[in-house]
Every structure is written in C-alpha cells, then in structure tokens.
Amino acid sequence: MYADFLISMKRPEEWAVEMQRVLELDPLNPFFQCFYGWHLVYLDQCDDAILQFRESLAADPNFPSARMGLWGAYYRKGMHEDALAEAGKFFAVLGDHEVSESLRRGYAEGGYSTAMQFAAEILVKRSGRCYVPSVRIARLYAHAGENDQAMEWLQKAFEQRETPLMHLSVAWDWDVLRDDPRFRELLHRVSLPE
C-alpha cells in the first residue's frame, strides 16, 4: 500500500524501491502482480503492463482488477477496440451483463465513445435504485469524452470519499480532464500533485 501511495504522489524513484521489495517478498501474490501492472500503466509503460496483466489473467481469467488494468493499458495506448473488449470482460466478470451488452451495442452504433456513454447511462439509472461507485460512472463518461458529466460524477465520488480518488493524479482515465480547472481544483482538495 505504501508503494501505491508513492506512485499516487508521483514519487516514482521511491515507488520502484518499494515495489521491487513487494515483488521479492511475495512474488506469486496475484494482487501485487496486478498492482504492479496498474502502476506501470500510471507510468505510461503500457507494453510492460499488458504483459503483466496477461500473466495475471493466465493464472485467473476472472480477476476483475487485472481486466480493468488491461482495459486501461489498451485505452492509454489508443487501442480502443482492444480496450472495449477488456471493458466488456471486466463488466462480465462482475456479473454485469447489462453493461457488457450496452458496450457492444454502443460500439456498433458509434464506436468506443458511444459504447462508454451507453454504459455510463445504464449505471446512472441504476444509481437511483442502488449503490454504484461514482468513480465508475465518471470513468465511463471520461472515456466517452463527456467531460462535464465526468466531473459531476468525480465530485460525487469526492463527496462519498471513494478511495479510487487517490489515483486521480496518475490514472489513465482522467487524462482528458487534466487541463480542466475543475479537475485541478479537485486534485488540490484531495491533496494530490498535478
């Protein structure tokens, strides 16, 4: 967890020392292997991350964090078709076939952005009936290029104190928002570096 804190605070040299120690102490732990992959994407080392996630998924094809990480690595590389496939698998592993189907339908109608918007709209409707992580909705809207909606849901995530916000300064999902003054203000409120 300290390595995760260091990468989130943009301290990669210190992160590398701690991450290496984690992998030495528990080299077969799938959670740590996946964490390492996520961190590689944060550092924009997507090719290495893809290999790391594929290794994790060979051991457990239904590991949702690895599916999301692979989705992110493909997205950051601009490989939207592969990113969409992994997004669909991520939601399928969660048992959310409604969202998986909406991704397929949206992609057929208008490509990656439309797929992400369709999925976001389903989760928004669902959030009126039950808990849906606001950061998950924000992520989909950010991938759809719907920056205002992404910011609205990030604000809700902040109000709900959702833990994924600790990765705001490094996570691939928010690359489209980095120049938005509202996003920079949110980074400040969460006490993260720009």
Image (cartoon, helix red, strand yellow):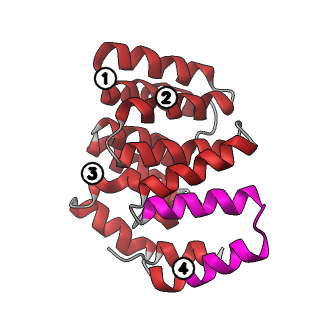
Is 87 drawn above or below residue 122 in the view shown?
below
**Location of mark 3 (residue):** 176
Q: Which residues are magenta?
A: 17-42
Mark with earlier residue (4, 1) = 4
Q: Quadrant of the N terminus?
A: bottom right
| Residue 133 percent across, percent down from the top left | 57, 45
- Say which residue appears at 74% left-offset and 41% top-offset: 60
Residue where numbered disc 1 is placed = 111
Q: Give the mark nearest the N terminus, 1 or 3.
A: 1
Cα distance between the residues tagged 4 and 3: 26 Å
Residue 182, disc: none
Question: Which residue is the site of mark 4?
Answer: 16
Q: Earlier in the sequence, mark 2 or mark 4?
A: 4
- Residue 85 numbered mark, or none: 2
Q: Which is more N-terminal, label 3 or label 4? A: 4
Residue depicted at x 27% and y 51% = 176
